[in-house]
Image (spheres, rainbow, N blue to C red):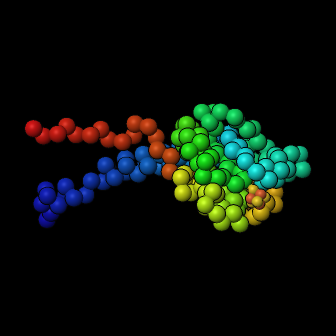
Amino acid sequence: MSSSSDLDLVPAIATRREDALSGLGKMVSQGLGWARKYSLFQYPFVTACCGMEFMAVAAARYDLDRFGAALPRFSPRQADLLMVVGTINVKQAPILKRVYDSMADPKWVVAFGVCASSGGFYDNYATMQGIDRIIPVDVYIPGCPPRPEQVLDGIMMLQQKIQDQRHQLIGNEPPALPAKG
Ligand code: SF4
C-alpha cells in the first residue's frame, strides 16, 4: 500500500500538461525558425574585392533571392544578417562593432572570405586577424574570394542554424516567486 507521500511523487496530470505545452512550444519554435530563415535582411559591410563576388551571388545567375536573403538594407536597424565582405583593418573595427551593436536581436553574422574570417594573407599590424575578435560569427565562408556556390552553401548552413535554434515564446516562463522576507 502506498503512502500519500508516494503519490506526491507521481504528478501524472501535471506531466501531461507540461508535455502538451512543450509540444506547442516546439511547433511555435519551428514555425518562427522557418519564417526567420527565409526572411533574412542583410546589411552588407563591404570593404574590398570580395564585394564583386557578393554582387555576383545577388545577381540573376545565382539569385540569392531564392533563399529569401536578397534584399540588402543599408540601415543596421532594419537588418538581421550582417555580411562582412572583405578586409577589415584595425581602424574600421570600432565602426563594424557599432554597426553590429545597432542591429536588433535576433541577429546573425557571416564572415565572407578569408580576409573577414582570419585576416587572410594580410598578416600585419593594420589588419584585423578575423572579425570574431570583436563580434560573434555564425558562419565562416572560406575562399579568396569565395565562389558563389560557397556563399550559397554558407547561407544554407546559416538557415539550418536558424531553424534549429530554440525560439522562446514570450511570457511562457513561470513568474518569479517573491523573495521571502
Ligand atoms: S578574401 Fe581575397 S578577394 Fe576577398 S577581400 Fe580578401 S583578398 Fe580580396
Q: Is residue 154 visible?
A: no
24 lies left or right of 76: left
Vertical side of 106 occupied by 113: above or below: below
Q: Position of residue 147 (x, y in %)?
A: 81, 60
Q: Residue furthest front?
A: 125
User: Looking at the image, which is closer to me, 178 or 114?
Assistant: 114
Q: Is residue 7 visible?
A: yes
Vertical side of 135 occupied by 129: above or below: below
112 lies left or right of 59: left
Q: How many marks?
A: 0
Q: Position of residue 140 (x, y in %)?
A: 65, 60
Q: At 62% from the left edge and 46% from the top edge, which residue is drawn? A: 92
Q: At 63% from the left edge and 57% from the top edge, which residue is drawn? A: 126
Q: Position of residue 52 (x, y in %)?
A: 83, 50
Q: Quadrant of residue 36?
A: top right
Q: At 53% from the left edge and 52% from the top edge, which residue is drawn? A: 134
113 lies left or right of 58: left
Q: Residue furthest right?
A: 61
Vertical side of 152 occupied by 81: above or below: above
User: Looking at the image, which is closer to me, 2 or 118?
Assistant: 118
User: Looking at the image, which is closer to me, 52 or 138?
Assistant: 52
Quarter of the image that includes the N terminus: bottom left
Q: At 70% from the left edge and 54% from the top edge, which residue is drawn? A: 87
Q: Residue furthest left?
A: 181
Quarter of image, ligand 1: bottom right
Quarter of the image that includes the C terminus: top left
Q: Position of residue 85 (x, y in %)?
A: 71, 51
